């Protein structure tokens, strides 16, 4: 109730968004295509001249049918674009819905950033985004990156003198807690966001390439259309063009001006429709459709795409540099082993085996040197523990040992905090006791903390020199690491109060002493390997994608997990440089790093900079690198990689901002699904290219040959517009939404420079196009005798013949969609019944085609066909199936066609140079 009251009084943490474009806006954009505008003008002229020459009853058909076809193309294109726009808006809204922790009623709860209200207390850690305007309550070494608000990259330190925090800024260093004072539109960030509209106009590399292909084909189509126009006008004005009944269309000095213009406009309309069918407008649309579809399905597979281009690039990934904790493992940590002194505690949570002094110091160090929290309900019930998985595991262990979290924190005062640092692999805290004694507690990677220890407390609470027993502790750490345990050491030292800086500025710059430490204990934390990770790694290996583990953990722990996950196949593989420490890799020269990077499978004890160096070395070696990361310090590597994958659960906001894709469940198996979807995007685009270019080539050749040789075209303007609709929108929807198959993961990654149209696609395309052209041109020139139409009038025979050509052509395209689904497989019908969308579109196309022939003859200049003629059309389409099967048995060279053309040029250059 209190939260609702504050929300009503001070507002919610949301801000009004600029509305996206309306459906009318997409309609307006769709009709502005130049070829469609020309067709509309041609339709207006045709309508006016038709009514004038043939009267209102008959003269409106030609112009109206072109109008209707253009209108249909515009509406379908607008609907498609509008739906994809809504899809991208929904994904952007999901991207902004950050989950964070707030303290309410003494406990930590996780809520959406939109549910924050004034008065909330929010803990801040490295990498977090400041979710609202507020004031710092407590903070240690807190540094804020305010560049998103001020435009300056300077890091600003926050303390009691400068406590104001602005929404939208990032925590660059340190820890703190803030009190929310302003939310939503009442913040500077809210005002800024409300004035910015989300831009969905990002063009991916594949879209840019396809736009180039479409432009080139469009220029070819335009050139052909101009040539056809010149030939047809030449034939028309020289009296060589005849109507279906044999009447000469134009006789100089006899034909009226109106009729002459009408005839010339009809010829012009034919030329324009040749351009319409030649320009593959559906190529960019197919990319948009497949990206939108893939993004939606990837959300279901726990991957949120932040940058569209990542969908494509992921299909080309040759290596994945993966974190260990939380990605390959479950991130459900529990303490399973503990050494206190030289004594191994069999039940790690059995406090009876600990000396009271050791237990007190351990509890103090764990309770104060943490960013986690323990909440004990006053009414009793289960204790609630929050924090990172490692913090939760250690706090849970300490609670079982009898730690009183709130009591211990009230018994001492925190003087200074050194937050856990992924470079140094440890964090510390300086405490002032009630008796004015100062204790400095450290916690971190076991071997690093151990190196700073000079003493240890034995099981009796007595201090012992560690030099003689250091090898024992190292062996204990190695044994735990070999059992795939994460080893954490806890140590402390006493310090003189008079040496502690008294001034606040000096205290904030104070480097905590990290020498002469007393070891309190070493604990082994179990983080089980995720189920399914071994299969996911195997899938990647089969797909030609090398998985590398890059972790900050001990090399022995990393090796054990890598063997468990299948990243390392056997112990024989676990030798340097296949398995290497970060500091060793860092010490190599740049050239040596490039050579060694190709071999590395596991990198342990790596710093974020080591990860960055590995990514740079791999990319220089020609690899397409995907990187997973969750910390703020992973941001440079995520940004440098071809595809940055941040973790949705444990990932910081800085890491997410630097990434291309957010893995919502932190699971490596989801990363593999992203690779699968990336390959699917590329494969679907190639399927559509093969389908559309087959139609383009066939329609263009048929009309051009017929127009130049006889002065008439078998496929008129309305029919070509209908075919264009099938190609561009329905075809794109059917093929661009084909779900990924397991076969995709048995191929090698798609190369960066690999041609869009492969030799296999050229083979399939040319066989189908040549068949369609040959059959339909034979029908065009010899159809009257073949179809037995000699007894019909010439006009009727021509109408039937042209209707059969149009119908057979559309049926061929329906079959061609099945063929394009499986460019490399002989069985083109496998799995087709599982794709309901594909089957639905095929069904809709078929039904609409039948309706067009049966009921819209006047508009489309078609006639009703007999059942035998329907069977002829179907037979022509069916014959292309065995032809496609035979064609796929023809072997093709793997060398791209472009190389064959470039070889003579290279030879000339080489001979010239020599």
Image (cartoon, helix red, strand yellow):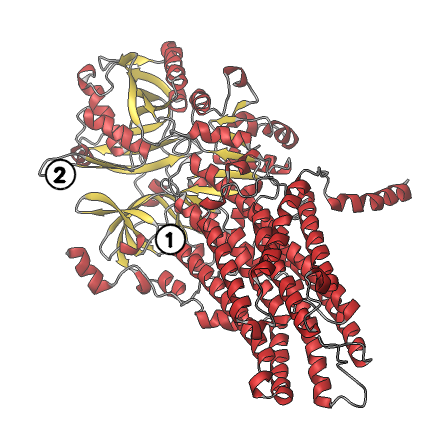
216 is higher (above) or lower (below) than 608: below
- The disc at residue 377 is 2
- Snapshot quadrant of residue 692: bottom right
Q: Which residue is mark 1?
A: 94
The reply to whether the C-beta atoms of the residues labelled 2 and 1 are less than 8 Å apart is no
Label 2 sits on a secondary structure element that is: loop
On the image, the x and y values in percent for residue 459 come to 24, 13
Image quadrant for the N terminus? bottom left
Asked if one can make out residue 651 in the rendered structure from this viewpoint, the answer is yes
Label 1 sits on a secondary structure element that is: helix
On the image, the x and y values in percent for residue 730 come to 52, 59
Label 2 neighbour load within 10 Å: few <14, some 14-19, many 20+: few
286 is higher (above) or lower (below) than 798: above
Disc with the residue nearer the chain's start (2 vs 1): 1
Q: Residue furthest left?
A: 379
- Give me the residue at 44% from left, 25% from top: 565
Asked if one can make out residue 701 in the rendered structure from this viewpoint, the answer is no
Which numbered disc, 2 or 1, marks the residue closer to the eye?
Answer: 1
Would residue 779 appear left or right of 579 to someone viewing this image? right
Label 1 neighbour load within 10 Å: few <14, some 14-19, many 20+: few
On the image, the x and y values in percent for residue 579 come to 53, 22
- Give me the residue at 56% from left, 22% from top: 578
Would residue 610 appear left or right of 492 to someone viewing this image? right
On the image, the x and y values in percent for residue 452 come to 39, 22
Would residue 453 appear left or right of 778 to someone viewing this image? left
């Amino acid at each position: 109730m209190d939260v609702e009251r504050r929300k009503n009084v001070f507002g919610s943490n949301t801000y009004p968004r600029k509305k996206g474009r309306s459906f009318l806006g997409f309609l307006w954009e769709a009709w502005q295509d130049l070829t469609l505008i020309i067709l509309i003008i041609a339709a207006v002229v045709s309508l006016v001249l038709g009514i004038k020459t043939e009267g209102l009853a008959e003269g409106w058909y030609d112009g109206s049918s072109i109008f209707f076809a253009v209108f249909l193309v515009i509406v379908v294109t607008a609907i498609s674009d509008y739906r994809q726009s809504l899809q991208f808006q929904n994904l952007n809204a999901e991207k902004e819905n950050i989950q964070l922790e707030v303290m309410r009623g003494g406990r930590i709860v996780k809520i959406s950033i939109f549910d924050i209200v004034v008065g909330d207390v929010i803990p801040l850690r490295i990498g977090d985004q400041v979710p609202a305007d507020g004031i710092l309550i407590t903070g240690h070494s807190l540094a804020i990156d305010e560049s998103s608000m001020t435009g300056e990259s300077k890091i600003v330190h926050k303390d009691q003198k400068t406590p104001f925090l602005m929404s939208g800024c990032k925590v660059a260093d340190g820890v703190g807690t803030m009190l929310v004072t302003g939310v939503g539109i009442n913040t500077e960030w809210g005002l800024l966001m409300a004035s910015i509209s989300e831009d969905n106009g990002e063009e991916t590399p594949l879209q840019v390439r396809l736009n180039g292909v479409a432009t080139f084909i469009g220029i070819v189509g335009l050139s052909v259309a101009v040539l056809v126009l010149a030939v047809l006008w030449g034939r028309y004005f020289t009296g060589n063009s005849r109507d279906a009944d044999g009447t000469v269309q134009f006789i100089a000095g006899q034909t009226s001006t109106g009729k002459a213009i009408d005839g010339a406009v009809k010829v012009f309309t034919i030329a324009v429709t040749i351009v319409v069918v030649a320009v593959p407008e559906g190529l960019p649309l197919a990319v948009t459709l497949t990206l939108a579809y893939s993004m939606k399905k990837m959300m279901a597979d726990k991957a949120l795409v932040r940058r569209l281009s990542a969908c494509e690039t992921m299909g080309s990934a040759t290596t994945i540099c993966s974190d260990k904790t939380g990605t390959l493992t479950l991130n459900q940590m529990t303490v399973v082993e503990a050494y206190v002194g030289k004594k191994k505690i069999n039940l790690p949570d059995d406090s009876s085996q600990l000396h009271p002094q050791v237990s007190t110091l351990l509890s103090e160090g764990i309770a104060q040197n943490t960013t986690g929290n323990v909440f004990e309900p006053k009414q009793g019930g289960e204790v609630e523990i929050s924090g990172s998985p490692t913090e939760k595991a250690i706090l849970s262990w300490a609670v079982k040992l009898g730690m009183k979290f709130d009591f211990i924190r009230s018994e001492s005062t925190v003087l200074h905090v050194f937050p856990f640092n992924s470079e140094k692999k440890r964090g510390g805290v300086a405490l002032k006791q009630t008796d004015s004694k100062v204790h400095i507690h450290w916690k971190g990677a076991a071997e690093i903390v151990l190196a700073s220890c000079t003493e240890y407390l034995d099981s009796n609470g007595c201090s012992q020199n560690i030099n003689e027993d250091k090898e024992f502790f190292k062996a204990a750490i190695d044994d735990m690491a070999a059992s795939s345990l994460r080893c954490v050491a806890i140590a402390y030292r006493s310090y003189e109060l008079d040496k502690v800086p008294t001034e606040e500025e000096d205290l904030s710059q104070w480097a905590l002493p990290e020498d002469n430490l007393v070891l309190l204990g070493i604990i082994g934390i179990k983080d089980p390997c995720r189920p399914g990770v071994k299969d996911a790694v195997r899938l990647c290996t089969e797909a030609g994608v090398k998985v590398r583990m890059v972790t900050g953990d001990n090399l022995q722990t990393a090796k054990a997990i890598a063997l468990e996950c299948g990243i390392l196949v056997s112990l024989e593989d676990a030798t340097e440089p296949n398995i290497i420490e970060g500091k060793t890799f860092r010490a190599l020269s740049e050239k040596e790093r490039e050579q060694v990077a190709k071999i590395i499978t596991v990198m342990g004890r790596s710093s974020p900079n080591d990860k960055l160096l590995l990514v740079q070395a791999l990319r220089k070696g020609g690899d397409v690198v995907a990187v997973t990361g969750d910390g703020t310090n992973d941001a440079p590597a995520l940004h440098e990689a071809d595809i940055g994958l941040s973790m949705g659960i444990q990932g910081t906001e800085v890491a997410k901002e630097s990434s291309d894709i957010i893995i919502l469940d932190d699971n490596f198996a989801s990363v593999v699904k992203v690779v699968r979807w990336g390959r699917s995007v590329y494969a679907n685009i190639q399927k559509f290219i093969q389908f559309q270019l087959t139609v383009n080539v066939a329609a263009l050749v048929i009309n051009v040959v017929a127009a130049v040789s006889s002065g008439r075209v078998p496929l008129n303007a309305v029919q070509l517009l209908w075919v264009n609709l099938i190609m561009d929108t329905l075809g794109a929807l059917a093929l661009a939404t084909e779900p990924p198959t397991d076969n995709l993961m048995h191929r090698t990654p798609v190369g960066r420079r690999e041609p869009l149209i492969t030799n296999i696609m050229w083979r399939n395309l040319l066989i189908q196009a040549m068949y369609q052209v040959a059959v339909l041109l034979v029908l065009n020139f010899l159809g009257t005798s073949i179809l037995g139409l000699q007894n019909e009038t010439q006009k009727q025979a021509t109408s039937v013949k042209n209707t059969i050509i149009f119908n057979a052509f559309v049926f061929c395209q329906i079959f061609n969609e099945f063929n394009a689904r499986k460019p490399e497989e002989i069985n083109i019908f496998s799995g087709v019944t599982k794709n309901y969308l594909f089957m639905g579109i095929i069904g809709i196309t078929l039904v609409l085609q039948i309706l067009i022939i049966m009921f819209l003859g006047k508009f489309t200049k078609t006639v009703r066909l007999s059942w035998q003629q329907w069977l002829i059309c179907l037979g022509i389409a069916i014959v292309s199936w065995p032809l496609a099967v035979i064609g796929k048995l023809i072997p093709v060279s793997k060398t791209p066609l472009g190389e064959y053309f470039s070889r003579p040029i290279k030879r000339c250059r080489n001979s010239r140079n020599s």
